[in-house]
Image: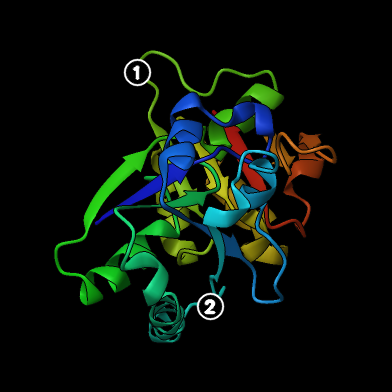
Amino acid sequence: MKLIVAGVGPGDPDMVTAGALRALDEADLVLIPHSRDGRPSVAAAALRGHLRESAAVPVVFPMVRDASVRDAALRERLEELRPRWERAETVVLPVIGDSALYATGAYLYEVWRGLVPGLELRLVPGVSAHSLAASCARRFLALGEDVLCVIPATAEPARIEAALRAADAAALYKPSALGEGLRPLVLGAGPWRETVRVDRAGLPDESVLYGDPALDPAEEYLSVLLLWR
């Protein structure tokens, strides 16, 4: 059996690649990510109109830091779905952004491989959030010998600051995780020539903030802070 983790971009249906659509069309089973409260994910919304209802089933991805809790929930759901996936040759999991960068598919694959040791993995790339954010801001992300750092704001602040200090340009994912600590941390690793924050890139309610307002506490989960020296 093969698990295909397909990146479907940041949520804009126009950003879903032909490769991802082909994988979905050929799949025996498509696992649709849902939040804990049952709402479809941004990835699912991007695929509206492209899914065969008969092949799609929901999978809740717990948004928790405790890996044991997350993995136990995924394992339980996989066992519930065993009658469906045991008959499948190809299963596709669409994920927001790119399939190889901060993708929830990695957790599902590791848990599933414990149940099916021979599980094959294939990754279909998608448009990453920082690439789209730079496009929305009409800025080139990095040029020539620029050192570009992609950093999760959920990391330890000391590690974030060290990465920022080493960077000529940086993309800070999920800046909402830092709350009031965002501004002092970023400024402490400066100086920065330009600062841009893009919330909900590619979606109808997209927001782009430039300069000092970009360092205000971010409430939006789907947010990327871009920095240039």
Identify which residue, 159 or 133, lies in the foreground: 133
Mark 1 lies on residue: 145
* Residue that label 2 marks: 64
Q: Position of residue 36 (x, y in %)?
A: 65, 76
Q: Which element is circle 1 on?
A: loop
Q: In which quarter of the view is residue 178 placed?
A: bottom right
Q: CA distance from mark 1 to mark 2?
A: 37 Å
77 displayed left or right of 184: left
- 204 or 188, which is in the foreground? 204
The residue under the point 63% across, 55% down is 175
Residue 122, position in %: x, y? 28, 44
Identify which amino acid the numbered label 1 is placed on. Answer: Glu
Residue under the point 60% across and 45% down: 51
Q: Which residue is most to the right? A: 205
158 displayed left or right of 113: right
Whether residue 15 sits left or right of residue 114 in the image: it is right
- Circle 2 Cα neighbour tier, 10 Å, few/some/many (<14 / 14–19 / ≥20): few
Residue under the image location 53 percent in, 78 percent down: 64
Quadrant of image for the N terminus: bottom left
